[in-house]
Image: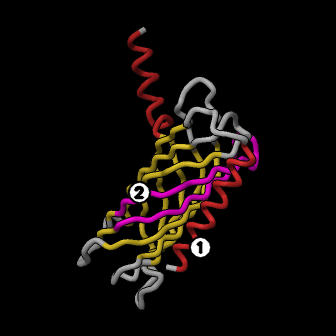
Amino acid sequence: MRTAFTLASTVAAIAGSCIAFEGGAHAAPQVSLGTTVGGALTGLRLEDGPHAAFHLGARGDVFFLRSNERSVGIGPFAEVLTAGFDTLEAGGGLSVLLPVFSSLPVIWSGGGFVRRAPALDWEGGVSTTLFFGAMGYNFHSWYEMQNGVFVSARYGLGDGRQADIVFGVRLDLMLLALPAIFIYEAIAH
């Protein structure tokens, strides 16, 4: 409980700093959807661990308070993922976007998830993710592409004693759809 309170206090302090620094919520939200592909070290708390696994997931982010690529953003995220196709995890939480370099932000996310693993019922956990990659600011639309690398730590609070580190790349769904859009436009025109 004390850890949850500390996490909530930290997120509230960061959010307050972002609002004070930015001066107000006058910008339209920026949304991104992507797939995550990579690897995972699972079972870090188990006697027979750790184990290497393939990671595949989907993630969506919404950022508020941004008015240009140098603006700090804060907003919710949602994700669904699997480790080696043995588990199913779904979760969400809060993300903070820090524009360290123009169009190359660092995004820190923290939240909770539920997990279903073999021989276990659903159990909860907490996660944190650090992302670095390309994400500017779209002045003409609410959608913003997000591509880069990430590392995530996931800690289960149930009997499964989950402790995983996940790493990989995030590829925006628009990036994956561009070849199909190009072919359609070439045929249609």
Quadrant into which the C terminus falls: top left
Query: Residue 119 location, x and y as percent?
Result: 23, 78
| Disc nearer the start of the sequence (2/1) | 1
Instruction: For mark 1, give the secondary structure.
Output: helix
* Looking at the image, residue 174 lies above or below residue 171: above
Please name the residue that numbered disc 2 is placed on. Answer: 56
Q: Nearer the viewer, residue 146 or 22?
A: 22
Q: Looking at the image, which residue is at 38% across and 56% down?
A: 80
Labelled pair 2, 1 in contact (Cβ < 8 Å): no
> Is residue 34 rendered magenta in the image?
no
Q: Looking at the image, which residue is at 61% across and 60% down?
A: 12
The boundaries of the magenta stretch are 89-114
Query: Residue 13 location, x and y as percent?
Result: 66, 61
Q: Quadrant of residue 63?
A: top right
> Is residue 95 rendered magenta in the image?
yes
Badge nearest the viewer, 2 or 1: 1
Q: Looking at the image, which residue is at 55% across and 26% down?
A: 141
Query: Residue 67 location, x and y as percent?
Result: 67, 34
Q: Nearer the viewer, residue 47 or 19?
A: 19
User: Mark 2 to mark 1: distance in Å?
Assistant: 30 Å
* Looking at the image, residue 25 lies above or below residue 52: above
Q: Is residue 28 left or right of residue 46?
A: right
Q: Label 2 neighbourhood size at 10 Å, few (<14), some (14-19), many (20+)?
A: many
Q: Looking at the image, which residue is at 75% across and 50% down?
A: 100
Which amino acid type is shown beneath numbered disc 2?
A: Leu
Please name the residue that numbered disc 1 is placed on. Answer: 6
Q: Count numbered badges in the picture.
A: 2
